[in-house]
Image (cartoon, rainbow, N blue to C red):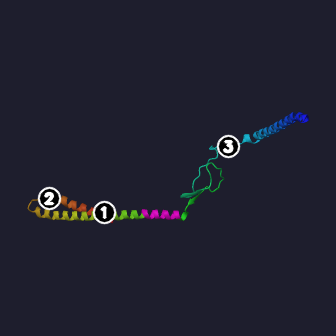
Amino acid sequence: MPEDLSQTPIRSRRNYLVFGLILALLLMGWAAWWVLVGSQRIATNDAYVEGNVTPVQAQSAGTIRRVYVENTEYVRAGTILASLQGDRSLLALQASEAALGRTVRQLRQEFAAVQETQAKLRAQQAQLTKLRDDLQRYRGAQASGAVATIQIANTVQDVNALQAEIAATAAKL
């Protein structure tokens, strides 16, 4: 037994030496990796670089169905970034329907304008009939001196002006 006790400190020292040597090799390996590789790598959670950021314009309008790239991901020219919901024929159909709606509204406005012009023409014709009746009465009353000649002349001018307005309104129709 005494022989076993004398070898225990040697073994213990040798174990510590082997452990220290392994630890030193691991530390030197980690230090070499850090100098060659680790110090060159940069990791961040949300960093933005303005150097290679390029605005992108869509070639056609539409609603995005799926996005194929992530935020700040590097892409090459020609890479498909997103796909649109619906195709061009659907978009063309929607544009045609919108154009049809505009045309129908415009046509309704034009019909309303025609009806308004017709009503204006009827009102002018009624006013012309009244002026002609007044002119006839004024001429009948002129002989007795109840109406001045100037009033008859003014009424004739009003009739002529109204006839010109009626002709202009009728031309609009």
Q: Amino acid at mark 2?
A: Thr
Q: Which residue is mark 2?
A: 149
Labels 3 and 2: the sequence-earlier one: 3
Say the numbered circle drawn on residue 43. 3
Q: Residues within 10 Å of mark 2 (few under 14, many from 20)?
A: few
Residue at the image point whose x is 67% and y is 43% from the top: 43
Residue drawn at 75 percent across, 40 percent down:
34
Q: Position of residue 155 (x, y in %)?
A: 19, 60
Cα separation between marks 3 and 2: 105 Å
Residue named by callout 1: 116
Dots 1, 3 in contact, CB < 8 A:
no
> For this rendering, which residue is in front, 148 or 163?
163
Mark 1 lies on a secondary structure that is helix
Q: Give left or right: position of 149 versus 76.
A: left
Q: Earlier in the sequence, mark 1 or mark 3?
A: 3
- Tell me the quarter of the picture where residue 126 sits: bottom left
Amino acid type at circle 1 is: Glu
Q: Seen in the image, is 146 located left or right of residue 171?
A: left
Which percent across, then down, holds residue 133? 17, 65
Disc 1 crowd, CA 10 A, few/some/many (<14, 14-19, 20+): few
SS state under label 2 = helix
Please, is residue 127 above or below residue 13 in the view? below
Amino acid, disc 3: Ala
Q: Residue furthest left?
A: 144
Q: Which residues are magenta?
A: 90-102
Residue found at the very far front of the displayed protein: 1
Image quadrant in which the C terminus is located: bottom left
Mark 2–mark 1 distance (CA, rounded to whole Å):
37 Å
Q: x and y percent of residue 6 in the render?
A: 89, 33
Query: Which label sits in the foreground, 1 or 3?
Result: 3
